[in-house]
Image (spheres, rainbow, N blue to C red):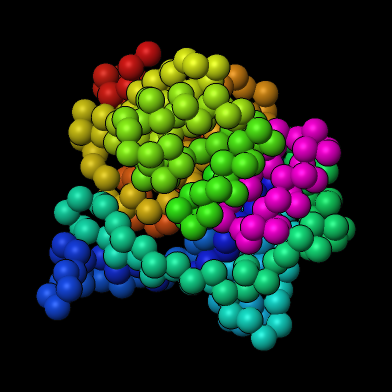
Amino acid sequence: MAAAGASNWDTLILSRGFPRPRVSARAVSVLEFPGGKAANVATAATRILGKGEGAVISAVGEDEFGRRLLRGLQDEGVDVRGVFVIEEEPSGRAFVIVDEGTGENMIVSFHGALLRLGRDHVDLAEVREAVESAKVVVVMDVPAGFMEGLVDLAAEEDRTIILAPGIKSSENPELIRSMLRRVDYVVLNEGELAELAGPIDPATGARALAREGARVVVTLSGRGSMLASSGEVLEIPAVDLSKMGLKAVNSVGCGDAFIGVFAAFKSAGSGDVEALRRASVAGAYKATRLEVRGSPTLEQLLKFEEAALGAGALNE
């Protein structure tokens, strides 16, 4: 499995509520974590598949943050051959506010060195080797030219392609819609779905997008997820953490855990229902962890799923 996109250093502020214009909110604590959507996804997949089975395609700066990010990924067993170190560019950063009461978040991202990746990078050996070694390629928040070139390369290699465009859904919706016939899956949250399909209910929007080519996966926060394909919509249940005596403490990274575990199980040959069910369990598990890369190992995932079933927190 290979994931292309951001590898950022995250500053997380745990606060009592969110600030409003001209009104301050009090910070409870400030924490630092390695993050970035593609790095999180590759880490989540590696924890399921095993060391060396997940790769990240990204860029960092020649700075201390970049060195920390590379060391963290290597310690997890993620293949970092596709991570370019860009001179005279800073590493990406993300600044995250988390409401300690609800676990909900606000994020401002700075992509830094990642923005230097262009279509010409797709032809480099580091990228081609990462794609050729993967069964599933996840394409995330990368520059448009690099995104198009990477999808073309993955299609040429007959890889399963998962497009998770993130902020590109609002920045360049025309590009994302044009790619729906070139990928196998597109993964969106409700806000991203609305940017592409309009302000309609998620099932209707997902069904409409699915008619344009890709199978559409929509994450519904604490309400589970859905898959639209060929006019049909399949709903995947969420884990009810309250029935397990647990609560969400940080929703940052839940979507990345979901995508990484979904990609891992698809890479291992699972069908859509099993892969999505396990992805939903992984997202719930991550929500109970404060760290951004709080996705489970395979053993932790299976134990958490068993506990959820035993508590009646997850429908069969």
Q: Is residue 151 above or below residue 245?
A: below
* Left or right placement of residue 283 versus residue 276 in this view: left
Q: Is residue 177 above or below residue 117?
A: above
Residue 237 location, x and y as percent?
Answer: 35, 23
Q: Quadrant of the C terminus?
A: top left
Foreground pick, 117 / 50: 117
Q: Is residue 263 visible?
A: no
Q: Is residue 61 above or below residue 250?
A: below
User: Is-magenta flag for residue 154?
Assistant: yes
Q: Is residue 159 visible?
A: yes
Q: Residue reaching furthest left?
A: 23
* Left or right placement of residue 192 versus residue 118 in this view: left
Identify which residue is drawn at 50% across, 31% down: 209
Start and end of the magenta stretch? 136-162
Residue 39 location, x and y as percent?
Answer: 58, 56
Foreground pick, 184 / 126: 184
Q: Quadrant of residue 20?
A: bottom left
Identify which residue is drawn at 63% across, 81% down: 89
User: Is-magenta flag for residue 41?
Assistant: no
Residue 153 location, x and y as percent?
Answer: 80, 45
Q: Quadrant of the N terminus?
A: top right
Identify which residue is drawn at 85% across, 57% down: 123
* Left or right placement of residue 97 versus residue 283 in this view: left
Foreground pick, 7 / 285: 7
Residue 261 location, x and y as percent?
Answer: 54, 37
Q: Quadrant of residue 115?
A: bottom right
